[in-house]
Image (cartoon, coloured by chain):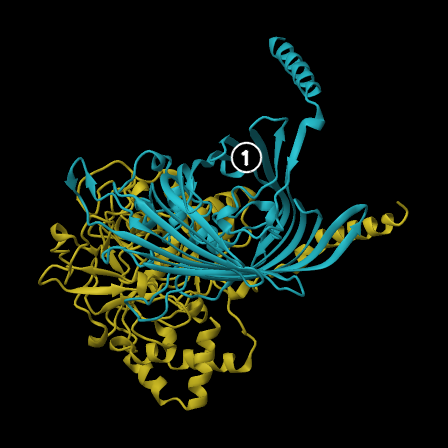
Chain colours: A yellow, B cyan
Amino acid sequence: MQKRLPIVLLSLMSLVAIMVSCEKIIPSSPKEDEILDGPVEGLSYEQLRRFALGDAAFNNEIFSPENGLGPGFVATSCGSCHAGDGKGHPFTTLVRFGQTDETGNKFLDQGGPQLQNRAIPGYKPEQIPSGATFSKFTPPANTGLGFLELVADADILAMADPQDLDNDGISGIPNYAILPTYVQAINNAIVLKGKYIHRFGKKAAAYNLLHQTVNAYNQDIGITSSFDPEDAYTRMVIDPEIPTLTVNNVVFYLQTLKAPMQRDAGNAEVETGRKLFEKINCSGCHKPTLKTGFSPVAALSNKEFHPYTDLLLHDMGPGLDDGYTEGSAKTSEWRTPPLWGLGLSMNSQGGSYHLLHDGRAKSIEEAVTLHGGEASASRNRFNQLSGAEKNAMLRFLESL
Amino acid sequence: MKKLFTLIISIGIGQMAFAQIDPKLLRAKPSDTAKNSLNMDAVYERPFIAVGKLPVSVGGYMEANWQYQGTEGISEGQQFQFRRMTLFVASTISKRIKFLSEIEFEPAEKEIAVEFAALDLELHPLLNLRGGMILNPIGAFNQNHDGPKWEFTDRPIAMTQMLPATWSSAGFGIYGKNYSGDWMLGYELYATSSFDDSIIANPENRTSLAASKRNPERFEEIASGQPLLTGKVAVRRNNIGELGLSYMGGVYNKWRSDGIVIDDKRRLNVFAIDFNTTLPKLKTFITAEWAWIRVDVPDTYSQQFGSRQMGGYMDIVQPVIKKTILGWQHSVVSLACRVEYVDWNVGKFRETGGNIGDELFSVMPGISFRPRQQTVLRFSYRKQWQKDILGNPAARTGAFQLGVSTYF
């Protein structure tokens, strides 16, 4: 018995040591600035609980025919299109069709505006109707959307220059569109002939994150809600397939996702690139700094942030004109995409870049050189930069 | 008051009943682990206890563990888990008619399942009839999965999350064995209840044979109306090892409703190969299994649900100490390592031509202590890399597990 005691004690001590130290041995978290998901700093416990519920619904709730998927659909969950809350992949790139001008979509009775290119077993997916123009939309990153939602209409309008009065070749106009019945206008909303300034989506055709979320559930996954009970496949009003509370939690999750953090901000090459970015006037559209208005969520209220967008539509030239549009945008007009998080895109796009609205650009440099229209002058200046200067600017963009 | 009275009476009767059993009458029938047998024999190769001369013997096993697991720095902390308790009841109805049942309790899954309950009728050593609830002989793990036999708390991922172990079905079939010198040959062939549409429409967001396990109607109704066929051939040569080749396949989807054809018939086909051996000098035990799955998924559905899967594992167990430890005679300490890989979606994206991800690789070293053959204390550390369907950087997981498992 005396001989056994040291063995028993040694074994027990080893076990206790392992149990205590195991926390330090498991894989550690990536650095905060290397990932896009996570809540904005400063949320209360109550808000964090709601964030967690929205996170679970967004990333973990998988739809199947049993709980409402389809019949036509693009993806089976929110997280399928936005891995790690980052940009999407061509696998989940969606197709919209049927609208060529501000008079509206002429193919709503033939499945427009969005193609449900997949269908549950036993059903046929939609086809693009003959004669309809279309455009492919790569899913955007989700992070920092709550900040963008809180930019005042007046601030967006202040960045617009429809007549190009400053002669920089850049105009920029908001997308005015009619609100869906379930969407409430923000305080101090600016209205033009009954239409409101929209800001989300490739064509800025979604008013706020509720509008965006409800539309995505309906058009991407085929899930009806109390906000939009019309089934995208049959065009019939059916019972909601998702609780209203879940939709609200997902909206809250999107509102309170943190803003992407810049990496290597103090690096000399990155700083050189930032200066070049401004010098060649990329910042004419990709505005580095915006600010939020009041929000009941203190962590979002009256904050300055750095999204590199102006939330306005710009004519990007014939090369990026697919002949399809939404709201009051012209077919060649695209909303300035935020550049924050750009350098982390490959981590959610399967290790490759799939940039611009349809993922056609396979590198940041290619994306820059495919700019046209109002961005032609900046693109030309970029092309004239030396190799070192281009590298510095690309390094800066990768740091975002 | 009534409940208290009932409780006291129950305890009293229980103690009286216990007192009436003469422990000398309890005949332990330990499994003959030294005997060369095939994986197909695993259902009977268990320690049973018989009471007196009753033709019924009983047994079972349990598994419990402590776990600390984290992925990319995120952990739910320390967990205590009671995985399962299983009860066996075997009965020799006559010399050539046997019945064996296995009932499994899994508290975490809120599941009490009849995992095996079959009548075996011997017509000839080479021709036995088996009917009831059977374990489909696909691969080896599905047949030979008792916790105390393994050096790790976790079951192999490829065999449980890709192949659906443990997968039992209602059905009938035949099996047989033949010995000749150092050679042993066995075969099994069954027609059973099958899978359903949930294998390509489920919350796992991937093709999952295991998803059909949630459908309790599968024991009464085959979704396709056509049986699942499972067959296996295994050969063992002493001093070399056992090699098994198995197949499982059939139409899985509900293609007809009330006589109306509502869909195409779609098949699944599964092939598996398994091998185990004990190296003669080192006594190193190696067991490995690999499986390939092909599922007919409609082209118009989503590539989220793959039409091809593959995966497997290999366990290497090296006994390092065999002696009396802490008073337990013939106790064994072993070092072990499991390597596993699963690709839940083999193929290329139609949109890009790039490789579809959804794959996992894991290495799990461990150490086990067996105070006796039927009881194991085991400790392991898992390091795992798992890629999502897009092939984004793998999520790294680490997991410590300390567990016990024993037959009783």
Residue A41 rendering spot, x and y as whole percentages? 54, 54
Tell me if B276 is positioned left or right of A106 in this view.
Answer: right
Q: Is residue A394 visible?
A: yes
Which of the 4 image quarters holds residue B134? top left
Q: Is residue B396 visible?
A: no
Of B278 and A291, the residue lying toward us: B278
Q: Residue furthest left?
A: A131
Tell me if A135 is positioned left or right of A252 in this view.
Answer: left
Q: Mark 1 = which residue? A: B88
Residue at 48% across / 34% down in the picture? B98
Which of the 4 image quarters holds residue A177? bottom left
Helix, strand or loop status at disc 1: strand
Of A160 and B152, the residue lying toward us: B152
Of A104 and B102, the residue lying toward us: B102
Q: Quadrant of the N terminus of chain A?
A: top right
Tag 1: amino acid? Phe
Residue A361 rendering spot, x and y as whole percentages? 32, 75
Is the residue B106 above or below the residue A385 in the image?
Answer: above
* Mark 1 burial class by Cα count in 10 Å: few <14, some 14-19, many 20+: many
Residue B66 rendering spot, x and y as whole percentages? 65, 46
Q: Residue furthest right?
A: A2
Residue at 25% across / 59% down in the picture? A175
